[in-house]
Amino acid sequence: MFSFFANIFGYLLELLYNLVNNYGVAIILFTILIKLILLPLSIKQQRTMKKTNEMQEKMKVIQFKYKNDPEKLNQEIMNLYKTEKISPFGGCFTAIIQLILLLSIFYLVRSPLTYMEKMSTDDINKYVSQLQEDGREVSSVYPEIDLIREYNWLKEKNPDDQNVEKMNLQMNFLGLDLSKVPQQNMSDYTVYIIPALYILSSFISIRMTTAMQQKQMNKNNKKTKLIDGKTGEELTEEVKEEVKEEENEMDAVMQTNKMMSWMMPIMSISIAFVAPLGLALYWLMNNILMIIERLVLNKVVKTEEE
């Protein structure tokens, strides 16, 4: 399935590359176009999440009212989803689609000769064998990136082979060689620029998510204080306890996110260190566009609410 979509996206990346004749610029334009294609799904997901959060209070009332009648509870919850015109699986479906497309694009950027240049597996294996026979290092994870980097040597070795010309991709982007892997070029300081920006963008994205959840937690705290100010005649002790339990759950979520805000950048370092810079550039652009998208959609949804 991932290969199917990667093959389709390969035509688009090839078209963009032929227009700009630079792999880095083509990756940036490609990432922007994919984000625009996925924008309707992102908007729908954001609205669904917002509406689902607004339903939580109604959901808690139903859960409290029918806590001793599971069958009636499920029926009332489904009626609530129908009334609010929200599918309980809508958000999951959108997230799954986005994940499939994201992994398909990962396949494409990792193997540009297969999905972008449409080279056969046999041809790729033949050139990999030539490099290995000459004692040149070939990555088992990104062999096609190594073939692109060794284009001049392969051209000299196979002067009349037209397939070799497909490896002649312009991988230089703003003075950076996108075919390089930081782990293999530790003495070259330029290989750390894109991974460092990718790690920074990952950190910002996590911090944004944490800040949004902190805002939700503050709302719950405010609600709890208002409830505590009411008399027992106005609200039962059970309802007060329900709200306080929600606050405790948010505390646990915030603690988890605080840990993730440190773990994710560390994981990003590990990933970016062993990936070709072309792949890291795609991840960086995807992070930047995701941050922009989140800021804009939050503003749009907030405006719609007002």
Image: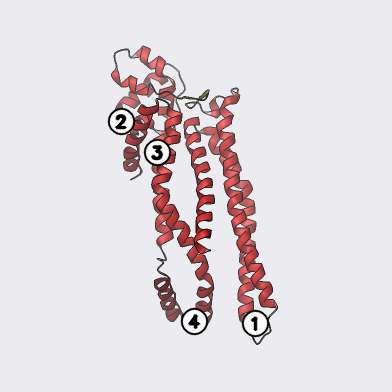
Corner quadrant of residue 93: bottom left
Asked whether the beta carbons under mark 2 and mark 3 sit within 8 Å of each other, the answer is no
Sequence order check: which comes first, mark 4 or mark 3?
4
Q: CA distance from mark 1 to mark 3?
A: 55 Å
Which amino acid is tagged 2? Lys
Instruction: Please tell me which residue lies in front, 160 or 203.
Output: 203
Q: Which residue is mark 3?
A: 107
Could you tell me which secondary element the residue under label 4 belongs to?
Answer: loop
Picture disc at residue 165: none
- The crowding category of the residue bearing disc 1, from other C-alpha atoms within 10 Å (few below 14, some 14 to 19, many at least 20), is few
Q: CA distance from mark 4 to mark 3?
A: 48 Å
Percent of width and height locating residue 9: 35, 39
Q: Which residue is mark 1?
A: 237
Sequence order check: which comes first, mark 2 or mark 1?
2
Asked whether the beta carbons under mark 1 and mark 3 sit within 8 Å of each other, the answer is no
Corner quadrant of residue 257: bottom right
Which amino acid is tagged 3? Tyr
Q: In this picture, is 15 found above or below 234? A: above
Percent of width and height locating residue 90: 40, 61
Q: CA distance from mark 2 to mark 3?
A: 13 Å
Percent of width and height locating residue 65: 51, 82
Which amino acid is tagged 1? Glu
Q: Which residue is mark 2?
A: 118
- The crowding category of the residue bearing disc 4, from other C-alpha atoms within 10 Å (few below 14, some 14 to 19, many at least 20), is some
Sequence order check: which comes first, mark 4 or mark 1?
4
Total numbered labels placed on residues in the image? 4
Which amino acid is tagged 4? Tyr
Q: CA distance from mark 4 to mark 1?
A: 17 Å
